[in-house]
Image (cartoon, coloured by chain):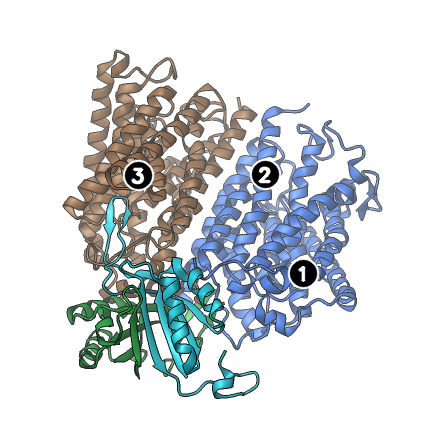
Chain colours: A blue, B green, C brown, D cyan
Amino acid sequence: MINSGDTAWILMSTALVMLMTAPGLAFFYGGLVRRKNVLATMMQSFFVLCLISIQWILWGYSLSFGPDKGHFIGSLAWIGLKGVTMAPNPDYSSTIPHLLFMVYQMMFAVITPGLITGAFAERMKFSAYAIFTIFWATLVYDPVCHWVWGAGGWLRNLGALDFAGGTVVHVSSGMSALVCALYLGKRRGYGREPMPPHNLPLTILGASLLWFGWFGFNAGSALGSNELAVWAFIATNTAAAAAGLTWMFIEWKATGKPTILGGATGAVAGLVAVTPAAGFVSPLSAILIGIAVAFVCYTAVAVVKLKLAYDDSLDAFGVHGIGGTLGALLTGLLAQKLINPAGNNGLFFGNPKQFGIQAIGVVATIAYSVTVTFILLKIIDAIVGMRVPDEEEVIGLDITQHEESAYTLLD
Amino acid sequence: MKLITAIIQPHKLEDVLQELDKNEIHLRTVSDVIGCGRQKGRTEVYRGRKETGGCLKKVRLEIAVNEDFVQPTIKAIMAAAKTGNIGDGKIFITDLVECIRIRTGEKGQEAIG
Amino acid sequence: MINSGDTAWVLISTALVMLMTIPGLAFFYGGLVRRKNVLSTIMQSFFVLCLISIQWILWGYSLSFGPDIGHFIGNLSWAGLRNVGLAPNPDYAATIPHQLFMVYQMMFAVITPGLITGAFAERIKFSTYIVFTLLWATLIYDPVCHWVWGTGGWLKNLGVMDFAGGIVVHITSGVSALVCALVIGKRRGYGREPMSPHNLTLTVLGAGLLWFGWFGFNAGSALSANGVAVSAFIATNTAAAAAALTWMFIEWKLVSKPTMLGGATGAVAGLATITPASGFVSPFAAIIIGIMAAVICYIAVAVIKLKFTYDDSLDAFGVHGVGGTIGAFATGLFAQKLINPAGANGLFFGNPSQLMVQSIGIAATVIYSVSVTFVILKVLDLVMGLRVSDEEEVIGLDITQHEESAYTLLD
Amino acid sequence: MKLIIAIVQPHKLEDVLQELEKAEIHLKTVTNVLGCGRQKGRTEVYRGRKETGGLLKKVRLEIAVNDQFVKPAIEAIIRGAKTGNIGDGKIFIQNLDECIRIRTEEKGHEAIG
């Protein structure tokens, strides 16, 4: 039975998650790069929205959610949305049209490769990016999504809890981002020349829209306009706020001043970490998650990254990979059946097994994403080359990849 | 006629302009520039990464004056821009061969100011 | 009984009101300051979202809406959301989870101290700002909110009508803003040096998002997807449009040209003014209220402020304080039981006593907010100092308070 | 060789560039600047508050020319920039001791243009 209230909420949530990719992520990343690369960076988010919207309808949805093949991937039975209709599919959600579930999940498939772009910003060839994205979505996102959320997926059968995509979205993209950063190498002059963000207000605009859209991402994942959506909504807002505050206070102690970039980064880290947990934890647990993720991600971004000197340019790994991993593990500690009877209790509520299951989910996702991403990069590098030539990098990707520039100097 | 080019701290601009006005020196052109000398750059911190050693934001003032205004101009700039700290800036003075007011076509001494 | 349609609408309204604070208010204010202060101004809005999100869960909600103590304030029995469950609380909203009502109200508690920041922009010390906000929210917002909206609150018992927060949000913050501007004093060089807005496109973006979010603020205050919500939605849009048009025509006649900033300011003034009335008045009354808002706020901002030379830098008092007061008053004139049977008729519909009740509500709120704000400021001035040093003010708050700058000059 | 610095109204820039092209003067550098001289600043109104006396937006042209091109350059700038109103701008002319084309290391007359 289709419920009009549930349908209204998921329609709106779908639009909210779309907003996260463009302009949310596009501006969040766009403000952080140098003036000469802002369009190229935004283009990567914008392009992925166009590309995966088509891929998902043609074969992505079928691979992810279609009838199971060996607990590993969906079959091609739903290719081109064959058999996906207005009738609700009770495996996934019994009160909204199956097509609405499909398009809602599409927006997740869109944003996930978009997150990776933070790792190779300012130096990736656009043609290579387009090829990488379509293969990554098909070979990494779609299978992992099937494992965790698809009917018959092996992690789902195992009982792994991932409310809104901590492993599916953030661990898969964040870990792949690290591989990309290592494989592509540093930006020319990294560590030697200053590379300050060219327009922080754009970044804050993006972060704010991400926060806004995340309500659709997490509370929408209840797939209904119900109590569970309310829990997830509150956990989302609370973790973001707690992580933003914590990050700023860490900076205040560590480097002398609280910064707005720190606040925004902290908030996004908090949102990432609470994603897998949102529908399973209480508001006070959400505060804990927020505080923990701020400490861990701050260490990853401001200490580990500088020490190991890899150029994860916009901290896709440091925020999404680390934050997602932490969130998935914390779900195994803090989940409560009291909040969501469909879930399970975590370690702190008497069920240590759940923590083990979460760990298996995280490790499997990391191992698989890292391996496939590495192979993809190798192949694409051999065929079209991943990086732009040195000279084009110095001139900037806006001009060399897209022949346009973001700002005029005179009137 | 001389062209005085001064590179100063951005936050001293208001003071310098006021001081110049007091000395009846009105013609000036201001632009944003970046540069550095002995001052090695303010530290800014982005996600824990310290950015130093880059060029600093400065303001460039160009003032065209007749000979008798050269000293007052320099004094005015010094009075307002000097803090005694590294990074206060520099003043360059070059000869000006000609000056033309576009509206009237006047040249030389009359055209200045 | 939880209704999924009502829940969907209030969920999305909550997200919309969150959007008003960041990026709405942040950019509305951020564009108006000088280039060297844009991040610190945006930071004030960003920080208040993080801070009050936590404060509200820990004790703010309990003080505002918890069981009544002496008609003045809620008690602490709901602190940490104890006893705030998913079952609807019929005192406040019978068809949505109680927790959803809590988080919806949270976003109002967030934006209210955010509005004040317009009064002390470009000169307040960040550490003092944090303490001020926390005290102000606890000592002013929470009690006044309880008076007007909390069960047992004395203004609620008196019959004061405030649909979406004209008194609770706009009067409290607006008059406190005036006190802040007076106690903290003018910006260095105010009236002597030009202090033009550094990027009006940001301001227009912010105003646009405020208008968008205000649908959640006003129409969401129906707490249900029903006729009252529709009526509030229409009144909101109508008043904003009427006020923006009026403001631009005033400028055209009195000064010379209609300005974009004038249009944006007029729209926000119209929105602030219609807030208390939105669920009680007809669209035609909304037009009149919009026109009144533009005329009176214009006089406040462009005549009175310049005459008395206080530096209400971004017109928090002139727009929100004055607008909120006109709105609360106009509610006593234009309210109609025909529109909202839960309300009362105003003077024009045969019930002069309502105007008296509204006036009492306004007067009590103004007196209370002004005196408590004054005391808080005086104490903080003694303990930690309100303003940054003169030199820091000239260098700019972005560098001196946060060690970052908004824009790069090259690349 | 001379270095010509012209400060002109931003909305006349297109005309000036066209006139310079016509006069076969191709080498130029353009920057945004703020400035004022006799013209005391445009009034802008923000929420009823008038802002006056601030510096005005101008455009600064730098043109290096050989001596025989000085007159044509000045004439071209005046043709392009002159409206007869206050605020049309100024032209400054300085001696240029040396000019070097980086690509070829040519010096002097050949390097210009």
Q: Chain of mark 2?
A: A
Disc on res. A15: 2
Q: Chain of mark 1?
A: A
Which residue position is annotated with label 3?
C141
List x then y, in percent, for residue A18.
60, 43
Disc on res. B110: none
Residue C83: in sight, yes or no? Answer: no
Q: Amino acid at mark 1?
A: Phe
Q: Residue at x 73, y 55 (%)?
A: A136
Instruction: Look at the picture and state if B111 lies above or below C134.
Output: below
Which residue position is annotated with label 1?
A126
Q: For mark 2, give the secondary structure.
A: helix
Q: Quadrant of the N terminus of chain B?
A: bottom left
List x then y, in percent, for residue A16.
56, 40
Q: Chain of mark 3?
A: C
Pointer 3 with pointer 2, Cβ within 8 A: no
Mark 2: give few (<14), some (14-19) or many (20+) Cα within 10 Å.
some
Where residue C136 sits, quadrant-wise, is: top left
Is residue A41 found left or right of C391 in the rendered image?
right
Q: Amino acid at mark 3?
A: Tyr
Is residue B57 found left or right of A70 in the rendered image?
left
Q: Residue at x 26, y 20 (%)?
A: C333
Q: For mark 3, give the secondary structure.
A: helix
Judging depth in this view, the residue of A306 and C263 nearest the camera is C263
List x then y, in percent, for residue C96.
50, 27
How many angstroms separate mark 3 from mark 2 (CA)? 33 Å
How many angstroms separate mark 2 from mark 1 (CA)? 27 Å
Q: Residue at x 41, y 47 (%)?
A: C49
Residue C261: in sight, yes or no? Answer: yes
Q: Nearer the viewer, mark 1 or mark 3?
A: 1
Q: Are marks 1 and 3 on the same chain?
A: no
